């Protein structure tokens, strides 16, 4: 048997329970995995112990830490002292960081300074106030640079769980463009990305939710929105192959929709009419309403233009919503607030390469993952993911229209794998294996520098909007 691979899990919340722990169990024998420590907040003790009860893979120990007064759930010596003791007594191979992201940096720095491999949920870090305070927004990129400097002196392999980089559909699009753009010397000229989470937070939940929270001064961009900022960064790097058309700057304009707007959009009479019962007026009090002005965004609407010498190379739009079509039809939150609270995903990519090529990706669900309540195939099915490629065939050859189905064939190929959950989850598994096998992989830390730079600029534009300033930022990309 291979030498044991000792793993620490920081944060055993809904995402880690759905993805990481089942994967650890799936590969436990192959890699001789031992979970030497699970860390979570003390208020999660009942939920964590209940989840672990009867699992095939049991942790050697569990550490519950107190919530820190400043909202940081990784407070100082309460965390670092046990971690130092752990590294003194045994060799730690890796840490999976799946906490609320404002705590990511302290775990990542500890791991890097001790040469420990890292698999961290997106985003890499999330400074409190990142979407409402321009200084905190700039700290997003500063955090990346801090870790970059530390990694120069470490052998840690750091993988960021941004799974669309290994998603079969997005990988097909990326690889096609890597060949197409330099062949015809025409840059990607337009990218439109849309994502709807289908996440309906009831008014009182806005003030207390810890899964995808807004109360810490960040929101959608630091939640699922990160994936699409990353897709934008990943795809626009393809234009760097064109010596005279490589962009140097990004001009960013952003607007937001947040809890303050949401509480004015749907008021208590609306809930009474829809659900047949009254809800509390407390979230709508003047003091509560005013406090939400400092909350993070539920939706972000961003226009970017990638420039070289004042000429536009690529125009991009990101329309990213958590407050979108949902299947939630109940007031009390479900036990699973991650995938079991009415959440459905709608996702779209529309990309142009001048007048030569249009590529579209479409993925639309009509029901919660794993809970089909109607017989549907294709559009509306949880596996739905289609790619459409339109070609100027008179100039470049090929079929004028090619359709490629990704989701359904993948489900058929994985029919014998009880752990298979879907095309996005399969991509997460690839990054998990990059972490276990110490491969740089498609989502290595070094691949996310442009993502961090763009994310920081977008957050700053949103923060300027909150501050009553022009929501405009120019980001230098460098060479």
Image (tube, rainbow, N blue to C red):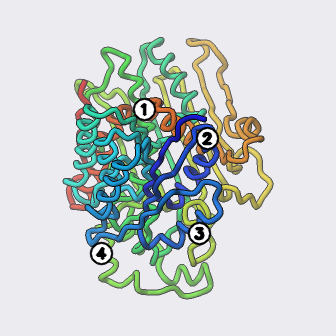
- Residue 414 position in % (x across, y down): 73, 39
Q: Which numbered disc, 4 or 2, marks the residue that appears first in the sequence?
A: 4
Query: Which label lies toward us, 2 or 1?
Result: 2
Q: Tell me the residue at 34%/32% (across/down).
A: 155
Name the residue carrying label 3.
50
Q: Which residue is mark 1?
A: 234
Front disc: 4 or 2: 2
In this orientation, does residue 317 appear? Answer: no
| 191 to 308, vertically: above or below | below
Q: Which residue is mark 4?
A: 291
Nearer the observer: mark 3 or 1; the answer is 3
Between marks 3 and 1, how big is the CA–CA gap?
Answer: 39 Å
Q: Earlier in the sequence, mark 4 or mark 3?
A: 3
Q: Provide residue 426's location: percent of width, then percent of height.
A: 61, 40
Q: Quadrant of residue 391?
A: top right
Say whether disc 2 or disc 3 marks the residue closer to the N-terminus.
3
């Amino acid at each position: 048997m291979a030498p044991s691979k000792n793993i620490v899990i920081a944060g055993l919340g809904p995402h880690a329970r759905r993805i990481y722990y089942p994967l650890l169990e799936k590969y436990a024998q192959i890699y001789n995995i031992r979970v030497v420590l699970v860390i979570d907040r003390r208020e999660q003790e009942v939920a964590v112990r209940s989840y672990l009860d009867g699992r095939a893979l049991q942790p050697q120990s569990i550490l519950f830490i107190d919530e820190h007064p400043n909202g940081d759930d990784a407070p100082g010596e309460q965390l670092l002292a046990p971690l130092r003791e752990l590294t003194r007594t045994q060799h730690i191979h890796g840490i999976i960081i799946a906490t609320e992201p404002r705590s990511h940096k302290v775990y990542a720095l500890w791991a890097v300074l001790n040469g420990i491999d890292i698999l961290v949920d997106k985003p890499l870090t999330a400074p409190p106030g990142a979407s409402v305070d321009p200084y905190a927004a700039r700290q997003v990129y500063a955090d990346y640079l801090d870790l970059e400097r530390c990694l120069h002196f470490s052998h840690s392999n750091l993988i960021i769980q941004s799974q669309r980089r290994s998603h079969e559909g997005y990988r097909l699009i990326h690889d096609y463009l890597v060949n197409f753009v330099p062949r015809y010397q025409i840059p990607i000229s337009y990218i439109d990305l849309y994502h709807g989470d289908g996440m309906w937070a009831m008014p009182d939940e806005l003030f207390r939710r810890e899964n995808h929270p807004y109360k810490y001064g960040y929101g959608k961009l630091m939640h699922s929105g990160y994936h699409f900022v990353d897709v934008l960064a990943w795809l626009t790097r393809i234009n760097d192959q064109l010596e005279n058309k490589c962009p140097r700057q990004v001009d960013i304009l952003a607007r937001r929709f947040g809890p303050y707007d949401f509480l004015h959009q749907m008021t208590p009479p609306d809930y009474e009419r829809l659900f047949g019962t009254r809800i509390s007026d407390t979230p709508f009090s003047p003091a509560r309403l005013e406090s939400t002005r400092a909350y993070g965004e539920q939706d972000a609407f961003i226009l970017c233009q990638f420039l070289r010498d004042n000429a536009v190379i690529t125009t991009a739009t990101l329309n990213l919503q958590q407050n979108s079509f949902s299947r939630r039809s109940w007031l009390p939150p479900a036990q699973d607030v991650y995938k079991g609270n009415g959440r459905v995903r709608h996702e779209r990519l529309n990309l142009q390469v001048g007048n030569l090529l249009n590529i579209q990706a479409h993925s639309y669900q009509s029901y919660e993952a794993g809970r089909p309540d109607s017989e549907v195939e294709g559009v509306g099915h949880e596996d739905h993911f289609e790619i459409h490629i339109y070609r100027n065939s008179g100039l470049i050859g090929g079929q004028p229209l090619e359709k490629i189905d990704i989701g359904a064939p993948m489900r058929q190929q994985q029919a014998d794998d009880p752990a298979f959950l879907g095309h996005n989850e399969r991509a997460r598994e690839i990054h998990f294996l990059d972490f276990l096998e110490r491969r740089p992989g498609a989502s290595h830390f070094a691949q996310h520098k442009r993502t961090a730079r763009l994310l920081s600029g977008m957050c700053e534009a949103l923060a300027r909007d909150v501050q009553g300033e022009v929501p405009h930022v120019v980001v230098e990309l460098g060479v």
